Amino acid sequence: MRYLPKSPADREAMLKAIGVRSVDDLFAPIPAEYRLSRDLKIPRQMAESEIVDYFRQRSRENGDGYVAFLGAGAYAHYRPVIIDSLISRGEFLTAYTPYQAEISQGTLQSIFEFQTMICELTGMEVANASMYDGSTAAAEAVMMAVRLTGRRSVVVARSLHPEYREVLATYATHQGMPLSIAGFGDDGRINLTELESRITPETACVLVQSPNFFGTIEEVSAVADIAHKHGAMLVVSIAEAVSLGIVEPPRQADVIALEAQSFGVPLGFGGPYCGVIATREKYVRQMPGRLVGQTVDRQGRRGFVLTLATREQHIRREKATSNICTNQALVALMVNIFMTVYGKAGLKELAKQNLAKTAYAAAEFSKHGEVLFASSPRFNEFVVRSSEEPRAINGRLLGHKIVGGLPLKKFYPELGNAALWCCTELTTRSAIDTAVGLVAESERSVRSAKEEVEEVTR
Amino acid sequence: MKRETRKATRHVNQNEGLIFEKSSPGKAAWKLPPLDVPEVDTAKLLGSCERKDLGNMPEVSEIEIIRHFTRMSTWNYAIDLGMYPLGSCTMKYNPRVNEAVARVEGIANGHPYQPEKISQGALHIIKTLSECLIEITGLDAITLQPAAGAHGEMTGLLMVRAYHQARGNARKKILIPDSAHGTNPATAAMVNYAVENLKSDSRGMVDIAALEAQTSEDVAALMLTNPNTLGVFEQEIHKIADILHAKGGLLYMDGANMNALVGKVRPGDFGVDLMHLNLHKTFSTPHGGGGPGSGPVAIRKTLEPFLPSPVVITKPDGTLSFDYNRPQSVGRVRAFYGNFGMFVRALAFIQANGPDGLRQTTEDAVLNANYVRKGLEGAYDLPYSTPTMHEVVFSDKLQAKLGVRTMDLAKRLIDYGFHPYTTAFPLIVPGALMIEPTESESKEEMDLFIEAMKSIAEEVEEDPQIVLDAPHSTRVSRLDETAAARKPVLRWKPTA
């Protein structure tokens, strides 16, 4: 086996040194009746070239060569080449959690820079070293608000990513945290009147996403005013990090739960991604997840360490702020490098291109179909309602190697034949024009079919 | 440094400040293509939502970024540099073909919501890995959705709760041995179970009499790590399972130490009802400086209705599909389907090994741990003489008499060119040195490690101060963790 660095002679010598006859003697503590006396029924040992072939084949069966108008919590942005050059260095790739600070300063300093940039972008005072993803970060942020307020219930916007809502429901079930849902209005934003009516003296926090699942930017300051008026906290989920380049961050929030996948993390069929929690300094001791802090060594030189570990499971066990035992260090490193590459000016220009492509696409679609929530500002997603089922239109688009917008019937049946479309800086005008053309064709054929029917019935 | 070490010598590494300290307006590492659609008036589109300023985000060039991160990388220890014997972390070699195949276009860039028709490749990977892991664990079904081991524990206990609930009583407690990882009790608390501590006996195993006394119809499950954190296989495992099952409780296995078992024994065969695996330990996906992990949960048939949604199924026409219609499901634990990129790497590892390779891997891991044990016996105190599997736990009892503790010994090991072992865990061993070499170490590397550890033990006798002041060879000396926690500085700020 090519990963194992021992010759048969090495093994013999080692067994002899230990004082046993065969390696099976070392497994003697396992009762004989449980020991496996056959081969595992798994694929046979493969050569490296066969493994590469196997995955190339799977790749060809997996949307390779398609242009997608899909967002909904997973965004296709350009990934600068140096991200993979740098994260492939064995010193980053094959290191463990930086508990031994003296030989982990590379990981530690890079996380410190990551925390700083997340603070700059979100307008918060502290950020953690990352979490599993945006959905679990949102759930953990809500539990943090529950601990901080001593209240138990939560009001959640229906315009929050439906799968984030599902994750929160799973986490909340056994914490005795009742959830209530506040709907959205014709502008695609949380209905403020309904929101206020759902807040009770037991409400720990309000959770909204902005830009929300429809790409619409929420009126965060109005939501914050309502939440704070009733003594509840405001948790804002951000799923599209690139929006932070041009959209004012929700500075009125008490906790921000960010999904940073947009910053240089491959779509990867849904993971691994990079959640982050950012908040105010005064709440830091209730924040879950790892934190890196600056300190000095015995000679007074600057250095970095994992800190405030007394919040964590390995110290506090069942009294910890969370059971979380890891962050997404390597993914956070991708995010870190992406933020460093684009920086202050680049992130803004990148976000502007997303805005321009989306404005163009939405304007084109609105000539032929109905673009919902058009009165509200949006970032890079929008909802198109068609006469025909989006699935049928998407089926025809697939023939052009285009994946159309995400059909919303599963999540929002009340919106009818609606689909969520996304454009990024990678979306070309010609792909937009092709997609709009097919939607227009669908509308025309539905209209003429309808006219025929009307003709006949008249 | 007084002593010679054959493993490491000093070398120069570059100084490097924070990236913000290199920033200067006008420097850039990015270039966007020209827009092919009309420019927009952002103020008009966004109104009051428009962001004007991005604060102190850096502005630097590409070469500076390359040097910045490359320089920092050289300050890290890594498996690629040498033995990383962190007990219970399973720091094995991370094969590079795993990284290559995870970056193949359709695998790296597949969107989680692309139609199933063009997702068959990803679904096939999920299904094949699932089948392999089911066979390896000897259980009946699996979910790959949890993002890490602790997340898998939570998912598992959610299923335990749902299982009991479906039988009319969710029960109240989870039994957890005192040798367990901290995540176990923290997880039980998240799922709203009370934690009851279970004592270990003099051999470091579950005390069967105590288990018998504490197991009642209030007990939902026992969370057992097997081999446990001492590296000891619970020889009376079947008795343990029987005691629980007799009262209707479930046996949950923390699979952190699965590296001792793969291909040699299957938890499903010795009475385990459900368990999580750590793909980043046993199945070679990189630790990456602390994540991403992946924590699949394998289960018995009786727990299948409660799996997180969605579940991959085969449709009558032979194509693969996600099934969302799972009325008894515990729900979702994560958006999308889990850390798919880690599934790809784990499957590539399984393929590179095959049944014979996985068995040899396990045998070598156990061989290495026993070789270290033999080599260090006498030089360090061995608190439990019970046979060990893939890891061995010594204590600092002999050295502590001279004022040197496990953390000091660990820091000194750095000077000898090794990453420290796990210190001060498990909690049942005061001053623990928890050593897990994994299968990835050659005899030569192990001999160097044993030599280094023995040399340090001698130093403690001759000149303890050199150990107390260690490490001597790193770019920073011991860092003041107390100051870091007392007055936390968690971000850079510009100096006014």
Image (spheres, coloured by chain):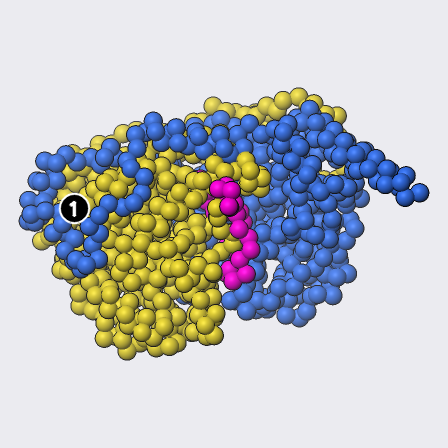
Q: Nearer the viewer, residue A123 or B304?
A: B304
A219 left or right, relative to B309: right
Circle 1: is it few (<14), some (14-19), or many (20+) Cα within 10 Å?
many
User: Which residue has dot 1 on it?
Assistant: B367
Q: Quadrant of residue B128?
A: top left
* Number of marks: 1
Q: Is residue B340 above or below residue A146?
A: above
Q: Secondary structure at mark 1?
A: helix
Residue B263 image offset from top left, x and y in percent: 25, 47
Q: Which residues are magenta?
A: B315-342
Instruction: Quadrant for the C terminus of chain B, please.
Output: top right
Q: Nearer the viewer, residue A335 or B130?
A: B130
Q: Colour of chain B?
A: yellow
**Which chain is painted in blue?**
A
Q: Chain of mark 1?
A: B
Q: Tell me the residue at 70%/30% (across/down).
A: A435
Residue A155 spot, x, y in % from top left: 65, 62
Is residue A115 shown left or right of residue A326?
Answer: right
Give whichever of A442, B32 is nearer the camera: A442
Residue B324 image offset from top left, x and y in percent: 55, 53
Q: Quadrant of residue B347?
A: top left
Residue at 73 percent across and 45 percent down: it is A417
| Amino acid on which disc 1 is placed | Leu
Residue at x-position 61% and y-position 28%: A401
* Spot occupied by residue A447 in the image (x, y as percentages of width and height): 83, 37
Main SS of residues in magenta: loop
Residue A62 located left or right of residue A422: left
